Amino acid sequence: MTAFTDFADNTKDISVMIGVALAFLALSSLSKNLIGGYGKLIQFIATLVMMYASLMFLKNIHTIFTVTPDIMYSPEHALYKKNIFAGCLLCVILFVLVVYSTYTVFY
C-alpha cells in the first residue's frame, strides 16, 4: 500500500463522518419545532462530530505531506495534487462551519 491509497481509504471513512454530521445539522435546524430543546443538543453533538472529522482530515493531509514531501513539485504526483488541494479547501470550509455552528448553539 502506498501513502496515496492510505490517504484515499482514510478519506472515505472521514467523508462518511462528515455526511452523518451534516445530516444531523440539517435535521436539527430544519425540525426545531418538532424536536424542541433537543435541537440544540443534536446540533452540538453534530458539531463535535464535524470537528473530530475535520481534525482527522487535517491529520490525514498532514500525513500525506510528511510521507511525500515532494508532492508539490513532482510530476508523477500530478494526479493526486488536485485531490489534496481540494481536501485542504474542504478542511477550511469545515472549520468555518464548526465555528459557525458552535456560535449558533451558544448564542
Image (spheres, rainbow, N blue to C red):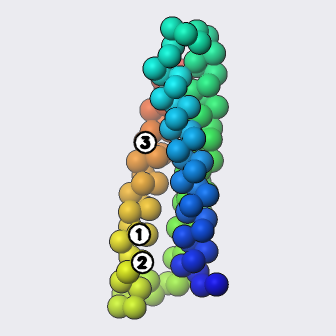
In terms of sequence position, does the residue under pointer 3 or pointer 1 come before the other? 1
Numbered mark located on residue 83 in the image: 1
In terms of sequence position, does the residue under pointer 2 or pointer 3 come before the other? 2
Instruction: Judge left or right: residue 15 versus residue 75.
Output: right
Q: Amino acid at mark 3?
A: Val
Distance from the alpha carbon under mark 3 to that under mark 1: 20 Å
| Residue name at image x 58 percent, y 19 percent | 40
Residue closer to the observer: 73 or 34? 34
Q: Are marks 3 and 1 in contact (CB under 8 Å)?
A: no
- Other residues around mark 3 within 10 Å, as few (<14) / some (14–19) / many (≥20): few
Q: Is residue 105 above or below residue 25?
A: above
SS state under label 1: helix
Q: Residue 74: where, in percent of width, then height? A: 39, 90
Distance from the alpha carbon under mark 2 to that under mark 3: 25 Å
**Corner quadrant of residue 1:** bottom right
| Residue name at image x 60 percent, y 48 percent | 17
Q: Is residue 47 above or below residue 71?
A: above
- Other residues around mark 2 within 10 Å, as few (<14) / some (14–19) / many (≥20): some
Q: Residue 83: where, in percent of width, then height? A: 41, 69
Q: Residue 63: where, in percent of width, then height? A: 59, 73
The mark lying in front, picked from 2 and 3, is 2
Q: Amino acid at mark 1?
A: Asn
Q: Amino acid at mark 2?
A: Tyr
Q: Residue 73: where, in percent of width, then height? A: 36, 87
Residue closer to the observer: 70 or 42? 42
Q: Is residue 96 at least partly visible in the picture?
A: yes
Q: Is residue 11 above or below residue 28?
A: below
Q: Are marks 1 and 2 in contact (CB under 8 Å)?
A: yes
Q: Which residue is mark 3?
A: 96
Numbered mark located on residue 53 in the image: none
Q: Are marks 2 and 3 in contact (CB under 8 Å)?
A: no
Q: Which residue is mark 2?
A: 80
